[in-house]
Amino acid sequence: MAQRVTVSSDGNKKISRVRVAVRLRPYLDKEDEKGEGPCVRGLDKQNLEIVNWRNATETVKYHFDAFHGEKTTQQEVFLSSVKPVLSHVLNGQNASVFAYGPTGAGKTHTMLGSAEKPGVIPRAVREVFNLVHAKDAEEGWDYSISMSYLEIYNEKVLDLLSPSSQDLPIRQDKDKNIFIPGLTNVTISSFSDFDTHFVPASLNRTTASTKLNQRSSRSHAILLIKVVRTSRVLPHRQQTGKLYLVDLAGSEDNRRTGNQGIRLKESGAINLSLFTLSKDSLGGSAHSVMITNIAPEYKYYFDTFSALNFAAKSKMIVNKPFTRETVAVPVLPVKRAREEHKAGGSGS
Ligand code: ADP
Ligand code: MG
């Protein structure tokens, strides 16, 4: 029997800023009843402009780490904004990808996509397996991959892999790791293994959302892929890297601070649960990417404006990624040492 102790929690302190990308979905006729045309347009790979509501002859320009225009493919979004952070997860660091923006702007399309146009989630999970297989032969580590899938709605955590267990608590351990006791964590050995668990769970969520009045727009869906690697030689160093893939609640709820009743409660819940989550995956120790999804039609105008302003602010968030590592310490000698100490102490 061996006990694990944390040996390093902040070695390798290299500052990594949150990477902020904006994705503009294609213009949809059906979202523009008045036939006003688009009010946002891309300028180049990092810049976009939006009509100024104070003066329609002007535009407001924004600069981001990446701008993905309406013709950008799912593969391009993945390659430019997501793939670069994935390798860190194999080295015991955390990484996260958030889709942010108003309901209807393309968050779920970006994260989940469709069978014909798979999004960030299936591409990232495939890539994690590819990276692990490529590493397996070298370096002397054994890798184990597992998944959890949860939804946060109104401060309640729902386990999407075990829908009967509702309202799980969110806790923090002594090393400031966020964890949710009771949350299902299933080991997955291949992409198809992942799919077997993920597809029905996603369907659960979609079905629930139509029944419960747009619930999906007010909840965060969080997929957690955990990669644990253990050294084959003593003292069996073990590192845990976590990848969070998050389809956030519609950003329009964060803007309306004057909400009443249930809407007010929901807005507050979104902010508080997002804050708790962000300790592990945004503010502290992660390589993070925020993909802000926006829509070009005028009916989204103010939600687009506030989403862009929020995204521009979050460019200031600075992360300090670090490796979490433990080593196996034999329990017996520790006990014996304590007994010897006791024996010595009684004699004095
Ligand atoms: P959200 O999850 O932010 O509410 P959705 O992902 O459901 O938004 O997108 C709203 C609609 O727009 C859906 O019908 C979706 O298929 C479509 N859509 C979103 N982004 C794109 C895109 N980049 N290309 C084509 N269709 C898109
Ligand atoms: Mg959605």
Image (spheres, helix red, strand yellow):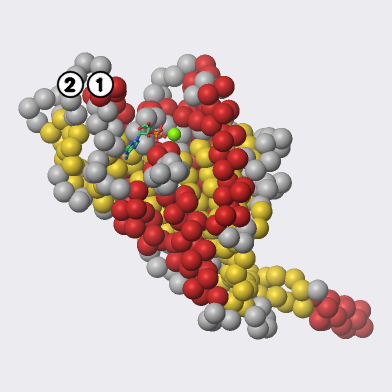
Please determine whether, in this image, residue 288 is positioned above or below residue 210.
below
**In the picture, which quadrant includes the N terminus?**
bottom right
Name the residue beneath numbered marker 2.
36
Count how many numbered circles sit on residues in the image. Answer: 2
- Where is residue 222? Give x, y as percent: 53, 44
Packing grade of label 1 (10 A; few <14, some 14-19, many >=20) is: some
Packing grade of label 2 (10 A; few <14, some 14-19, many >=20) is: few
Mark sitting on residue 208: none
Residue 203 seen by the camera: yes
**In the picture, which quadrant includes the C terminus?**
bottom right
Contact, CB < 8 Å: mark 1 with mark 2?
A: yes
Q: Nearer the viewer, residue 259 or 196?
A: 196
Q: Residue furthest front?
A: 116
Q: Nearer the viewer, residue 341 or 205?
A: 205
Q: Nearer the viewer, residue 174 or 198?
A: 198
Please determine whether, in this image, residue 243 is positioned above or below residue 216.
below
Q: Tell me the residue at 53%/71% (across/down).
A: 133
Mark sitting on residue 32: 1
- Where is residue 141? Give x, y as percent: 59, 77
